[in-house]
Image (cartoon, rainbow, N blue to C red):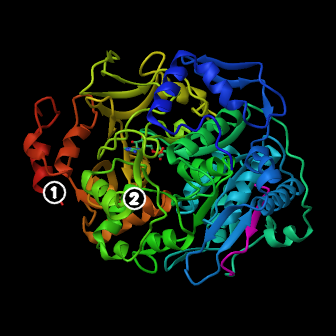
């Protein structure tokens, strides 16, 4: 594989690229976009309005992203391995696909979609385990021009149906079952519950994976049956650069999850560019990202980024602790992984299981190890760096979001100052700023502020599905002419960014974003709950845990059985990831005179710092605070 000119491989190259990217951003991005396969060249690089917002990249360009992920590699590296699939059970067979085999699988899948009525612009929901068919399904959607909406297979039937309804998806692609560690879930049965309320669904396409008996009905098409008949040739649909590529639902601080929309051309350019640079991918390296395809990390760094770059990528079905807490390191050794990318929550969980699990393995193939999804605390950073990186692999702490499409702030492999808990400098092309709450630019270093971005980048969010106003309001209204991230950050004396965390009512549990309002709404569905307030609190493994304060009716039992009922409702409405870690029964909540819950106070009580509550005199009833502190669980 030849290394393209935009792979930045030294500090000097970084400095120069950064300078070019700010002096003439359009020229910078155009020169990168030129290296891809387009069906028609763009007439203008960028059209941008952050007020509406309305951002377009590579205007009027035409392409199909899968021709860039697959077809363009066939001539020179058709036999190179594209995907190595490592099953949940280490004794089961590994499945590998070369780029030529990937082409065949995706073409067949595309034909199956087409035969079942899927055409350009249709929405297809993907609810699959971490099996190669998940990647094929995403790519097949892109190849026929359908918009995929992947829903993490840990979400409940209710959460799935909400997402299907919002996107008006025509098809859902699932499997009979899923295995993770020793747990099994019959996904097709969950889909059966979900689609009862989804009139838009015309087909349920089911991949046979675990071989379990599942409920099927007139909507069903079995993938393996359709596969037998499907042709191996498929002409990729022509897409406009700004045609939607996918929707990915993510939580915000209010109401229901929103469908973040990414479009084709810009997302492609940035996924490839950020992948190559952050991970310094070269030659026949083997890259492994442990995320699930249900999250943005899986989209950009299991499927699109690695395949665009023509890399070899590991896809893992299982969990880090099965059958033993050495599974990650065993797989690194087995497939000679060169770049490894995971989440702080996994690092902390493995760290707690003892060093001997990692010490058993040489892991000398590792060159870059990455972290994503939540702030990585110093202890976990040091452990990851020493026990896994061993002074040889560079640790990259990558900051980004579903909305940004790709990594925004990070060291590029060994390039940059590697300082615990600091993500580092922005990638060339990215212009972050720190602002005060009043929107004043903070120019000095050694300051803390709200993190925003002042110039568009190719893979930024375009809209929220079906509700453009929400996109404007959430991301573009807080500070004029800026994209607001919702994160707070600090810049050190060298300009390195340290991400502090969310400043809105979003909590990050094991790297999964959840809105406090979403969890509250679920708890409130319990018939004996009058009101609830949910906050995050520091949790040793998960980063943040969920602490729920609940007011129940007088007749309610207020015991563990009642807690279990509320947990069950949350699992049903959202999924197990949203189950509260602690539930405290309270008789009142700290509210201002205008009825707003003072979450600041609840957060302090939950994290055990209630001795520094500050002024509570503006509360409607300051005495509730003492009674909540007394009842802390
Ligand atoms: C947080 C995940 C600290 C942040 C790619 C952001 C991080 C949210 C980091 C996005 C990091 C992500 N350090 N915090 N390296 N990476 N975050 O949309 O609060 O699932 O706003 O995207 O995760 O979560 P999302």
Left or right: 400 in relation to 607: right
Q: Is residue 92 above or below residue 246?
A: below
Kindly identify the residue that appears in the image at 41 percent across and 57 percent down: 578
Based on the displayed image, in which of its 4 quarters is residue 631 positioned?
Answer: bottom left
Report the image quarter containing ligand 1.
Answer: top left
Q: Is residue 342 magenta?
A: no
Q: Secondary structure at mark 1?
A: loop
Q: Is residue 209 magenta?
A: yes
Residue 526's disc number:
2
Q: Nearer the viewer, residue 612 or 502?
A: 502
Percent coordinates x, y for residue 192 in the rendering = 67, 66
Left or right: 26 in relation to 586: right
Q: Residue furthest bottom?
A: 91
Kindly identify the residue that appears in the image at 80 percent across and 47 percent down: 143
Can you identify the residue that label 1 sits on?
632
Mark 1 packing: few (<14 Cα in 10 Å), some, or many (20+)?
Answer: some
* Magenta part of the chain: 199-211
Give the label, 1 or 2, closer to the camera: 1
Residue 170 can be seen, yes or no: no
Q: Residue furthest left?
A: 611
Give the distance between the C-alpha atoms of the residues marked 1 and 2, in whole angstroms. Answer: 22 Å
Residues tagged 1 and 2 counted as in contact (Cβ below 8 A): no
Q: Nearer the viewer, residue 613 or 339?
A: 339
* Magenta-colored segment: predominant secondary structure: loop
Query: Of the residues under marks 1 and 2, which one precedes in the sequence?
Result: 2
């Amino acid at each position: 594989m030849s290394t393209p000119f935009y792979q930045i491989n030294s500090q000097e190259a970084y400095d120069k690229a950064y300078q070019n990217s700010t002096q003439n951003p359009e020229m910078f991005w155009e020169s990168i976009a030129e290296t891809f396969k387009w069906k028609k060249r763009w007439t203008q690089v960028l059209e941008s309005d952050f007020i509406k917002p309305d951002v377009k990249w590579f205007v009027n360009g035409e392409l199909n992203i899968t021709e860039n992920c697959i077809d363009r590699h066939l001539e020179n590296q058709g036999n190179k391995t594209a995907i190595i699939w490592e099953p949940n059970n280490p004794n089961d067979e590994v499945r590998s696909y070369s780029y030529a085999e990937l082409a065949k699988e995706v073409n067949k899948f595309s034909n199956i979609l087409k035969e079942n009525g899927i055409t350009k612009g249709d929405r297809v929901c993907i609810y699959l385990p971490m099996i190669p068919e998940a990647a094929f399904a995403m790519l097949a959607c892109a190849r026929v021009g359908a918009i995929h909406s992947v829903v993490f297979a840990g979400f409940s039937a209710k959460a799935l149906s909400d997402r299907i309804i919002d996107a008006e998806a025509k098809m859902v692609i699932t499997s009979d079952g899923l295995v993770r560690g020793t747990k099994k879930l019959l996904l097709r049965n969950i889909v059966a519950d979900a689609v009862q309320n989804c009139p838009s669904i015309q087909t349920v396409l089911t991949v046979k994976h675990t071989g379990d008996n599942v409920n099927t009905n007139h909507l069903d098409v079995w993938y393996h049956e359709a596969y037998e008949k499907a042709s191996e040739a498929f002409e990729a649909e022509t897409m406009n650069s700004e045609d939607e590529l996918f929707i990915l639902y993510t939580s915000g601080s209010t109401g229901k999850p929103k469908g973040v929309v990414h479009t084709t051309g810009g997302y492609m350019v940035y996924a490839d560019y950020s992948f190559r640079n952050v991970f310094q991918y070269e030659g026949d390296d083997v890259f492994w990202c442990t995320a699930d395809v249900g999250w943005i990390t899986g989209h950009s760094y299991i499927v699109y980024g690695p395949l665009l770059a023509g890399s070899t990528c590991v896809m893992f079905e299982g969990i880090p602790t099965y059958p033993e807490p050495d599974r990650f390191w065993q797989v690194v050794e087995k497939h000679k992984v060169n770049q490894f990318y995971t989440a702080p929550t996994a690092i902390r969980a493995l760290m707690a299981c003892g060093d001997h699990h990692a010490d058993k393995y040489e892991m000398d193939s590792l060159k870059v190890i990455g972290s994503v999804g939540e702030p990585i605390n110093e202890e976990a950073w040091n452990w990851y760096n020493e026990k896994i990186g061993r002074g040889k692999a560079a640790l990259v702490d990558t900051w980004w979001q579903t909305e940004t499409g790709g990594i925004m702030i990070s060291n590029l492999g060994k390039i940059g100052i590697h300082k615990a808990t600091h993500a580092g400098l922005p990638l060339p092309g990215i212009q972050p700023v720190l602002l005060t709450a009043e929107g004043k630019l903070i120019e000095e270093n050694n300051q803390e502020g709200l993190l925003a971005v002042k110039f568009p980048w190719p893979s930024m969010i375009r809209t929220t599905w079906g509700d453009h106003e929400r996109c404007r309001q959430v991301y573009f209204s807080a500070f004029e002419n800026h994209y607001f991230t919702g994160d707070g950050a600090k810049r050190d004396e060298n300009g390195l960014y340290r991400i502090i965390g969310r400043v809105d009512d979003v909590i990050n549990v094991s790297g999964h974003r959840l809105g406090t309002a979403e969890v509250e709404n679920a708890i409130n569905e319990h018939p004996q709950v009058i009101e609830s307030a949910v906050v995050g609190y520091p949790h040793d493994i998960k980063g943040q845990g969920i602490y729920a304060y609940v007011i129940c009716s007088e007749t309610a039992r207020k015991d563990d059985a009642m807690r279990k009922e509320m947990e069950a409702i949350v699992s049903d409405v959202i999924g197990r990831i949203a189950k509260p870690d602690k539930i405290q029964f309270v008789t009142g909540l700290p509210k201002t005179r205008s009825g707003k819950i003072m979450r600041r106070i609840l957060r302090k009580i939950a994290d055990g710092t209630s001795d520094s509550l500050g002024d509570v005199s503006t509360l409607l009833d300051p005495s509730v605070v003492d009674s909540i502190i007394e009842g802390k669980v």
